[in-house]
Image: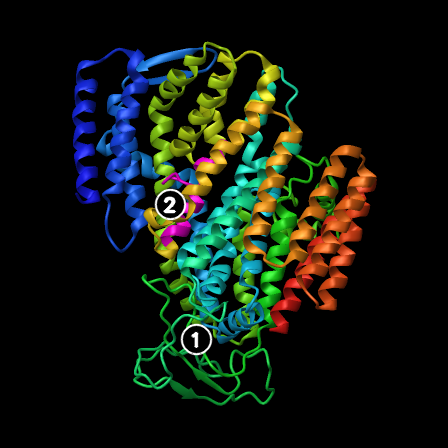
Amino acid sequence: MEKNKIVRIILAIVSIIAVIVLECVSSSRFVLAKFILLFLNFILVLTLTKGNKHKALRVLLLTILYLGLFSWFLPAASFQTEFTKEGFSQVGLFDLFSNYFATAFQYFGTFALFVLVVGGFYGVLHMIPGYRTLLDRMVEALRGNEKLFVAVVIILLAVITSVCGMQLGLLIFFPFLASIILLLGYDKVVAALTLAGSTIVGIMGTTIASTNITYLVQTLASGGADISFNTAIGTRTAILLLGIILLIIATLRYMKKSATVTGGVAAKTTIEAADTPVIIKEVEVDNSKTVKKTTKKTTKKTTKSRSKNSNKALAMENEVIAVKEDFGNSDCDIVPTRVGGTHTTFPIVLSFVLMLIIFVLAYIPWNTSLGIDFFDKITKSLAEFKIFKFALFGKILGTTNAFGLWTITDLIPLLVIICLFLGLVYRVRFEDLVQGFINGAKKAMVPAAIVILVYVGLVIVTFHGYQLSIYASMLDLANGHFNVGAKILTALATMFAGLFNSDPTYVFNALTPYFTSIFTDNSTYEQAMVIMQSMYGLSMLMAPTSLILVIVLATLNVSFKEWFKGIWKTLLILFVALLLIVFFWNNIFTWGIVALAFLCLVFLNCKDWIWRIAAFICEVLVALIFIFANPIVTGVIVGLLVIGFAFLITKDWVIRVLGLIAGILLAVMIALSIKILTIIGIVALILIFIAILIYVALKG
């Protein structure tokens, strides 16, 4: 019997049972049973969803439909100081289209605007042949080191998310990184695992990113518990590392299946011959004409620069050869047209470097989590600085947030300035620059619509209040005792809260007040904090309302079915591992799991015994950190690990020297723990990492 027929039969049976229960049982005691039947119905319908285009968007629309449907069968409730039943509050069609979309636009429209601006930014980049040249150089430099590149990207994105939060802002770099992965010969599921997977793992293992856990910390602390942003920081760091390791294992295993392999090295995707008649988009840059789109049956075009001052920053010097490329089974146009000729890439590299530096510095919660007010004082002094009794900088900049307090809105002018900078350097006419920006924004319309739709779902569950009835029916089963069963119920309730709300503030706002009213022993809140934070992140790896996940899948045209094929084992292992961590609540056990996962990663992917021995040495050194529990010992060991890693991964002495400097800086920072030194050290480490990226990009 075909799989779809079996699913249809199960769906019919579940639907019949659901109708009977929903019609015949009205008691509030059966809220959980009703929800389980409705949720099973939803999952079975999702499995039957088909189509080749806008796969993730269709799933999201179906999810919103069910979120509205739940309100017809599940009673609403609210909680201020006590739990209050409010009866049924059904979603109406006019409410959905006239009110909820307007509310989503009003409160979350800037997120959609940001997505459109990111699309516009890449529309400008696609006009400049130097961008494709940069991608090709990066790909050539990474040949033979594809696994290492993917692993480094996963680590980088996860750590940035864990430390900075504001995961939506990382969309700035996603098309660039996705293009490199695709040009290395891997399919779009690998790109999705690398980008969306790593970012969500960073959410799951949030360390100091206050934007992701502020409401959780505040609510649990209001119950009298000693909860802060640094609570259980060791356990949360271990969860971050465990998630990174397991995701790298899953991604590398999937890469083996998806790559076109030639002699053990991932090959480029199929490229049609230059003399094959194809429809091309040609980019031509000179002093008189910047962009010209034509339809030709040849793929060669020769132009001459009319500038007396020949500038290598121009987009093109000799000739442009545009070649059509095939990236597999979908119509994704993230990768720009392949071009020939000589093109300068430094301005683009500089732009990405500046954006990365500003992003990290702007979103690290310096004051909130680290207690460092250096940037607050600098921003205030700059705004108040007067020239001839006139606050010139304050007036020019306007209301400016200090680093550590930036929002997604602050990134929009940065992207616009970068676009203008690139247009000026590459001598693109302003009209063509605007047109390129508009074309890119048009391509981002679906991701922008997804942002609004995700928040429409959030508005529905917030306004109609049935979600609290579900959480209450689950948590009440524990009878106020935070035992093993209560921990499992809390984990499941948090995952459902993630499905309903997507945004961490709304997730914890919906769940934690009632949780603290049921479980009054605040000595257990530290464990509860870890459960809620980690399980919320885990739910974002599979929820059709996960903003980052759905945007990435929609952009790459990857279905949820394809996504789950690559991630389901990791999801299952993570769920079990997280529960075990909370059950045992012991640092030795927690870090033991991380150590075991790390050894599995090394032994599964490295046949070289040098790496395997290095892994054992690394385990011993980390164990010494726990044995001595001394900042000096910790600093020295961390520094040695960084230096050792730099010397193992490359024979290039430039990178080795930079790794040596980074290791020494880390050792000093950790050993001395002085605030001003920490600031200088973090900035220096960022600059070192950026220097390595520039070196690798330009060396290619």
Q: Nearer the viewer, residue 298 or 365?
A: 298
Q: Residue at x 48, y 47 (%)?
A: 197
Label 2 or label 1, whichever comes before in sequence order: 1
**Where in the figure is residue 223, as x and y percent of width and height?**
58, 15
Q: Nearer the viewer, residue 292 or 317?
A: 317
Q: Please provide the residue range marked out in magenta.
A: 535-554
Q: Mark 2 or 1, which is nearer the eye?
A: 2
Report which quarter residue 207 is drawn in. Answer: top right
Q: Secondary structure at mark 1?
A: loop
Rendered image: mark on residue 564:
2
Report which quarter residue 598 is drawn in. Answer: top right
**Where in the figure is residue 436, as x and y percent of width and height?**
42, 67
- Whether residue 538 appears in magenta in the rendering, the answer is yes
Q: How many marks?
A: 2
- Whether residue 277 appears in magenta in the rendering, the answer is no
Residue at mark 1: 338
Q: Amino acid at mark 1?
A: Arg
Q: Quadrant of the N terminus?
A: top left
Q: Amino acid at mark 2?
A: Phe
Q: Quadrant of the C terminus?
A: bottom right
Whether residue 399 appears in this view of the structure is no
**Where in the figure is residue 53, as x and y percent of width and height?**
27, 55
Image height check: is 513 above or below 7? above
Rendered image: mark on residue 363:
none
**Pointers 2 and 1 in contact (C-beta within 8 Å):** no
Q: Secondary structure of the magenta portion, mostly? A: helix
